[in-house]
Amino acid sequence: MLNITGYIFLLLGSQMYQRYFKHYELFKLTAMGWFIGIAMAPFTYALIFRWNLEWGISDTTLMLFDDAISEVASQAFIFLPMTVLYAKITPPHIEATCFAFLASASNFSGIFGGVVGAKINEWFVGVTQEDLSGYWKLVTIGYVCSTFPLIFRYWLLPTNADIERLQKSMNEEQKTNEVEPEETKKTK
Amino acid sequence: LSLGGAVGAIISALLADNFPASYSFLGTGFIGLIMAIMVANTSSDIEDVGEKSDEKDKNRSCMADLKKNLSEIKEALSVPEYYSVIIYFFLKGFTNPKFGTFGYYFQTDVLKTS
C-alpha cells in the first residue's frame, strides 16, 4: 500500500516539477525540499513516540501522509532537478560516459550516507533491531545533518545563468569543431 | 517510471498475499531471464544513432574503451560546473547520514506494517 501510494505521488511530483518548478534555481529547489522535510518532522516524531494513537490517527494513515508528501518533495525538488542538471552540464560527444559518471557519483553519495549513518549509530547511539528505543535520536541526527548540504550548495551548485553560459560555450565549441574538419578538407 | 512502479507494487502485493513466497521468487527469476534474453538480442547498431562510428570504434578492446571513457571523464572534470556538482555529491554523502534501514525495522517491528 505504501509503495503504491509512493509511486502515485511520484507521478504527481513529476507533474508539479514540469508545470511549476522547472525554471527555478536548483539551490532554491533543494532548500524547498529540505524545508518540506523539516516541516514533516513533527509527524515523524508523532509516529515514533506513538502520539498519533493518542490523537486518534492510525499508524497507516500517518505513514501514508508522510510517505506521500516525502515522495512529492523528493521527486519535484531533488531528483528531477538534479537529473535535468546532469543532462544540461554534460559536454557534447561524451554524454553517455559523463551522464553515467554523474549518476554514479550521486548513487555513491546515497550509499556513502548509509555507511556514515551505520557508523554514527554504532559509535554514538547503539540502536539495534531488538532495541529501537533510540531511533528518535537517529532521526534527530538525520534532520540536523540535512542542513549541512544547504550550506555548501550556494558555492557548488550552478545557477541557471551558469548553466546557460556553459551550454552556449559548449555549443560554440561544437560548431567550431564541426567547421574545422570541413575547412581542412577544402585546403587539402 | 512511477506508473510501472505502481503496477509492479500492486502485482507484488497480490502475489505476496495470495501465493507462497516461492512464486514471487520464481516470477522475479523468470522476468530476469526474459530481460537477459532481450538484452542479448539487442542490436549494437542502436549505439550509432545520431552519429556514425567507424569500424575501428566497434572493434575496440575493453581496455581501450576504459581508457577512452577515463579520458572523457577527465575532459568533463575540467568544466567547473561539472566538478563542483561531483564535489557537492561527495560532501552531501559525507555530511548527510541515512538511517533508512532503522526506519524499515521500526516500521516492521514496532508499527507492524510494511
Image: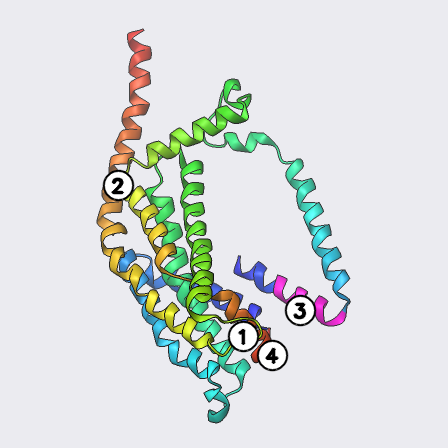
Q: Is residue B67 above or below residue A163?
A: above
Q: Which residues are magenta?
A: B8-18
Query: 10 Å neighbourhood of mark 1: few (<14), some, or many (≥20)?
Result: many
Q: Chain of mark 1?
A: B
Q: Chain of mark 4?
A: B
User: Magenta stretch containing residue A66, yes or no?
Assistant: no
Q: Which residue of the protein is positioned furthest toward the top in this rendering?
A: A188
Q: Are marks 4 and 3 on the same chain?
A: yes
Q: Secondary structure at mark 1?
A: helix
Q: Which residue is mark 3?
A: B13
Image coordinates for residue B38, horizontal then vertical, percent: 67, 41
Give me the C-alpha separation between circle 3 and circle 1.
20 Å
Q: Secondary structure at mark 4?
A: loop
How many marks the image carries: the answer is 4
Q: Secondary structure at mark 2?
A: helix
The mark found on residue B63 in the picture is none
Q: Are marks 3 and 1 on the same chain?
A: yes
Q: Main secondary structure of the magenta part?
A: helix
Give me the C-alpha separation between circle 2 and circle 4.
48 Å
Q: Which residue is mark 2?
A: B80
Give me the C-alpha separation between circle 4 and circle 3.
16 Å
Closer-to-camera residue (B69/B54): B69
Query: 10 Å neighbourhood of mark 4: few (<14), some, or many (≥20)?
Result: few
